[in-house]
Amino acid sequence: MVEVLPLLVLLLDSCLLSSVLFHEFMRPRPSKKPPPRPTAPDPAAGSRRRKAPRPVLVGVFLAGVITCYGFYVYQSSSLPEGVDLSNTDVSYRYNATARTFDKGVDFTERHIGITKLRKELVQQARGNVLEAAVGTGRNSEFYDLDRIKSLTLLDQSKEMIEVASAKWRETHGQEGNCRLITRSALDPLPAAPGPTDEAEDNGYDTIIATMSLCSTPLPSLFLRNLATGLSYKERSGAQTASAASGDRDDDVPSRIFLLEHGQSHYSWINKLLDRTAPAHAWKHGCWWNRNIGQIAEDSGLEVMEIRRKDFGTTWWLELGLPEMAKGEQRQQWLEGTRQEIVKRRAERAQNEGQTEKELREGDEARRRLEELEKWRREQRDQVKKKS
């Protein structure tokens, strides 16, 4: 059924697109007989003619969206026999797809509005900014350098960071106040650039993460760990050095902004996502059926705002520090978060059904076979040309 359903979606889309095109281009042509004597135009008729193309354009747009989504689902509909991903971290998949990642998602993101949402989200950044799970740097072009003091781009994939670095230089010139670090966002976060004076907490004013919760093995702890990097100072306490110099606005609380994809408002879409999720994770390193709202709630962070679109599958979230991360309890909360992450990662390492090492070795063997087959084809083509 998993293999048939995407085909049915594509078939339905083809029928819709065909009917739209027929309606637009195959309508009966006017007769070649001499036209009747002109009469005064009917304003109502003219209005109707002007409005006629609107449903056609809407139909074409919907057909395009269904085509993109249906094809994407179809690509993710099958899992290799014997592969169990129930307890496996598949985020390493991005190492292999870094060079071609942008080409695979550009068209879809632009046409369903994700690119526009990225721009809107990143424009919330101010002060010292951290972007976690930066990937290939798809948000780089949207940063307003006049509003930020420093920018730290973080990703666990060296291959992704290399692409992001090249993209930043292409967009903004030299890296300047931007630094790129290869590190998992589940590891202790790097301190924000600045003085190491005890009066400073060296935290970030804004933390950005887009399309990140789908790939991390511990999504709720991922959010908690991001929160440990947020700047926090008691407003009634002494003014910090950065606030006094105007580099940081202590009246504006630090925030985490997320743009994610996950479960829908509708059960039939969620069932489709659930059926294809293992194969999609195997191919792309992404679990696209996660309940983003529940993950945010489980993290214990303060949920300031949630917005959803695209049938509820696209999530915009603004999160803040919980009360327990403030004041006298802050240090205890920080230590508890760190210990919980270490414990959970150790448990996962012990309980994995199929280890990352086995998966990587299998991928490497397949890659080498593909390269060998490509080389053989090139050799055969050269022989044919010479003969």
Image: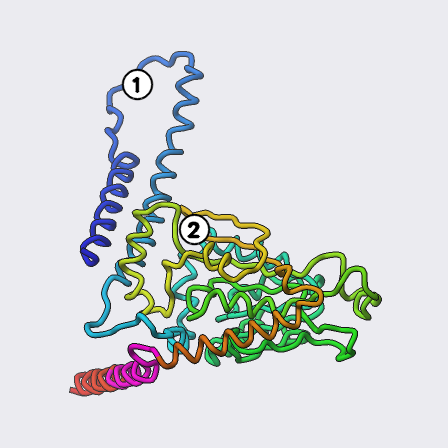
Residue at label 2? 112
Could you tell me the amino acid type at mark 1?
Answer: Pro
Between 131 and 214, the residue placed more toward the observer is 214
Which residue sits at x=74%, y=65%?
Answer: 233
Label 2 crowding class (10 Å Cα cut-off): few <14, some 14-19, many 20+? some
Q: Is residue 82 left or right of residue 117?
A: left
Between 247 and 219, the residue placed more toward the observer is 219
Quadrant in which the C terminus is drawn = bottom left
Give the x, y percent position of residue 355: 32, 81
Q: Is residue 61 left or right of residue 249?
A: left
Mark 1 to mark 2: distance in Å?
Answer: 45 Å
> Mark 2 or mark 1, which is nearer the start of the sequence?
1
Could you tell me the amino acid type at mark 2?
Answer: Ile
Quadrant housing residue 374: bottom left
Q: Is residue 312 above or below residue 209?
A: above
Q: Which residues are magenta?
A: 351-369
Give the x, y percent position of residue 90: 37, 73
Q: Is residue 14 above or below residue 291?
A: above
Q: Which colouring convention does the figure follow?
A: rainbow
Q: Nearer the viewer, mark 1 or mark 2?
A: 2
Which residue sits at x=24%, y=46%?
Answer: 14
Residue at label 1? 35
Q: Give the total of numbered labels.
A: 2
**Does the magenta run of residues contain 361?**
yes
**Does the magenta run of residues contain 22?**
no
Quadrant housing residue 357: bottom left
